[in-house]
Amino acid sequence: MSRAADGPHPHPLTPADLPAGDEWAHGCPDCHLPIQGGSAGLAAHRRTAAPSTPARATRAARSTSSYERPGRSHPFSEARMPRKPVTWYIATPADGIIEMSRQAGTPVNLAAHVGKVIDHPNPCRAKWYDESRFSYFRMVKRVGEVLEDTGIWPVTWPVRLWSVEPLGETGNWSQRYYPYRLLSHQIRVLEETDPHLALGPCGRDVVSVVQQEIPERAARWAADWDADPEGMSNRKWNWEQCGGPTCGSGRWADSLAMSVSHNHRESAAQTWIEHLARDTVDHTLADTDASMMARCYAYSRATGLAVAAQHQNRFEPYILDALRGVGLDSSAAVAAA
């Protein structure tokens, strides 16, 4: 920085006023910078140094944030920002018993302990290892993942959703891969909550699609395929690979839905939704003579329709129509609808 920008040098002495030789080699009396060469060195120092002046000190003080000065904390520091209370969830079948506890022979019924503390009946000694089928309580703070690793099979609906409070020592398999999970040997059951949350924010719409729309359409999807297997196979391939003028390709939309579910911590929700959709197709076509390929086609249409309901508030029609398979239905079916 030039002297012009910083004002005059802090000491008014001239080289003639200072002792000759290297007596000032230890440094400038004001700047404390090392000087060699006596008077000549001091003169060179005055021409090139960027001294500490009152003006410079004032600018330095102004450049320092008021929140970085002693006694002040940054407004966005963790100490000042309020933390949102964490809610932990456990999912059970309709009877309220943790399925893994049932399979281990030590059933734990959450429905019978609302507002109470439950100790694990057979906790693992080495934390947190699976020494038995049911070694600890498993809970999640991302409700879209609550249906993962529940032991509930086959996939069913409805389930029951409980908010719980972990007590005592807690752990985790890996904070890197399972940051939304928590393990403990003692919990307090707080309350039962809306199970549709386990299927995402649009869980009620998803259930409506699975229980009402898919049964109405599954037979028609299968009939379309069996009426013209070769033609439907070509149309399905074009939809999966190329899409259409008003929607993207089916494979691209499926991949995007999976990625968005992962980013929103709803992978378990999407997996559950797809199972529910396929099971509904099986029930609808159970008493029909639909071919295996017709059933597979109906599976793909049903899962796409249900996943579109899951993401209906996140995607634009260009993606939602690709998931729903718009354009795949026969002209007669579209006209009838």
Image (cartoon, rainbow, N blue to C red):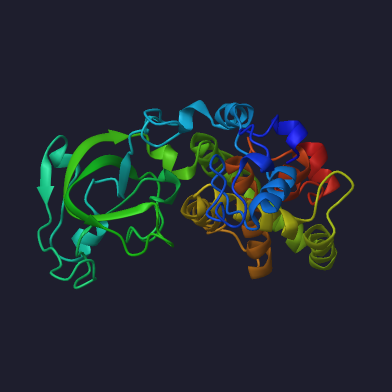
Across and down, in percent, residue 255 comes to: 67, 58
Of residue 102 and residue 222, the one placed in the foreground of this image is: 102
Q: Residue at x 12, y 47 (%)?
A: 118
Is 65 left, or right, of 150 in this rendering? right
Across and down, in percent, residue 108 comes to: 16, 52
Query: Which quadrant: the N terminus?
Result: top right
21 is higher (above) or lower (below) than 141:
below
Is 64 left, or right, of 47 in this rendering? left
Of residue 152 and residue 185, the one placed in the foreground of this image is: 185
Q: Return the residue found at the far right.
A: 245
Residue 219 seen in the figure: no
Q: Residue at x 30, y 54 (%)?
A: 182
Q: How many marks?
A: 0
Of residue 233 and residue 70, the one placed in the foreground of this image is: 70
Which of the 4 image quadrants contains residue 136?
bottom left
90 is higher (above) or lower (below) than 279:
above
Query: Which quadrant: the C terminus?
Result: top right
Q: Return the residue found at the far bottom.
A: 131
Q: Residue at x 40, y 47 (%)?
A: 157
2 is higher (above) or lower (below) than 25:
above
Across and down, in percent, residue 336 comes to: 78, 38
Residue 111 seen in the figure: yes
Which of the 4 image quadrants contains residue 181?
bottom left
Across and down, in percent, residue 176 comes to: 43, 61
70 is higher (above) or lower (below) than 130:
above
Is 24 left, or right, of 330 in this rendering? left
Of residue 1 and residue 27, the one placed in the foreground of this image is: 27
